[in-house]
Image: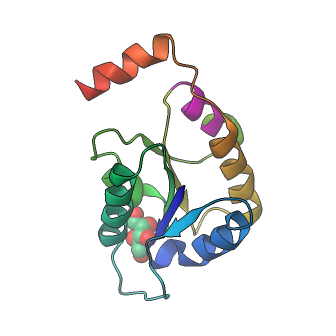
Amino acid sequence: MIILASDHGGYELKEKIKNYLAKNYDVVDVGAFVYDDKDDYPKYAKLAMQRMIESKNARAIVLCGSGVGMSIICNRYKGIYATIGVSEEQVRLARQHNNINVLNLGGRNTSFAKAKKLIEVFLNTDFEGGRHTKRLNAIDK
Ligand code: RB5
């Protein structure tokens, strides 16, 4: 399952990502469902993270204008490892070493073409485990 969420800053890109992923994945969109420039990103981050915690082995793609506000909130939930996607190499390492389960994207700084590349890496790269597991356990403690 892939959970999607955005505020207005990420809304347009989220909608494109939803249509793209829905062809091959079970996608759950927790909002926003309309563009409203008065909505606030904490509401949608919370909805997405609640859904993540209920769902085993889910991944989430959570967007705002910059990706920053959403990543701050997602990382406050235990068991969530979130980062803003910057490059394919950075997202690859974030999966292999940090086991990220949430990819944050900035709707105002990420083209759809780039988002698709980052998402492919996010969804198709495995965590390496080993020495990295010990480090993640240290974070959780
Ligand atoms: C909304 O204007 C904007 O602040 C929000 O989408 C996000 O970028 C916050 O980090």
Residue 139 x, y percent position in the rendering: 30, 26
In the picture shown, does residue 64 fall above or below 49? Answer: below
Q: Can you see residue 133?
A: yes
Quarter of the figure that contains the C terminus: top left
Residue 88 x, y percent position in the rendering: 70, 41
Residue shown at 53% from the left, 71% from the top:
10
Count of marks, rendered view: 0
In the picture shown, does residue 140 fall above or below 105? Answer: above
Residue shown at 39% from the left, 53% from the top:
52
Quarter of the figure that contains the N terminus: bottom right
Residue shown at 52% from the left, 18% from the top:
129
In the picture shown, does residue 71 fall above or below 40? Answer: above
Farthest residue to the left: give it. Answer: 141
Looking at the magenta stretch, what is its main secondary structure?
helix
The quadrant holding residue 40 is bottom left
The quadrant holding residue 30 is bottom left
Find the magenta span and give its range.
91-97
Q: Can you see residue 87?
A: no
Q: Nearer the viewer, residue 113 or 131?
A: 131
Residue shown at 49% from the left, 29% from the top:
98
Q: Nearer the viewer, residue 115 or 60?
A: 60
Colour basis: rainbow
Residue 132 x, y percent position in the rendering: 47, 17
Q: Quadrant of ligand 1?
A: bottom left
Q: Nearer the viewer, residue 66 or 136?
A: 136
Residue 138 x, y percent position in the rendering: 30, 19
Q: Is residue 58 magenta?
A: no
The quadrant holding residue 75 is top left
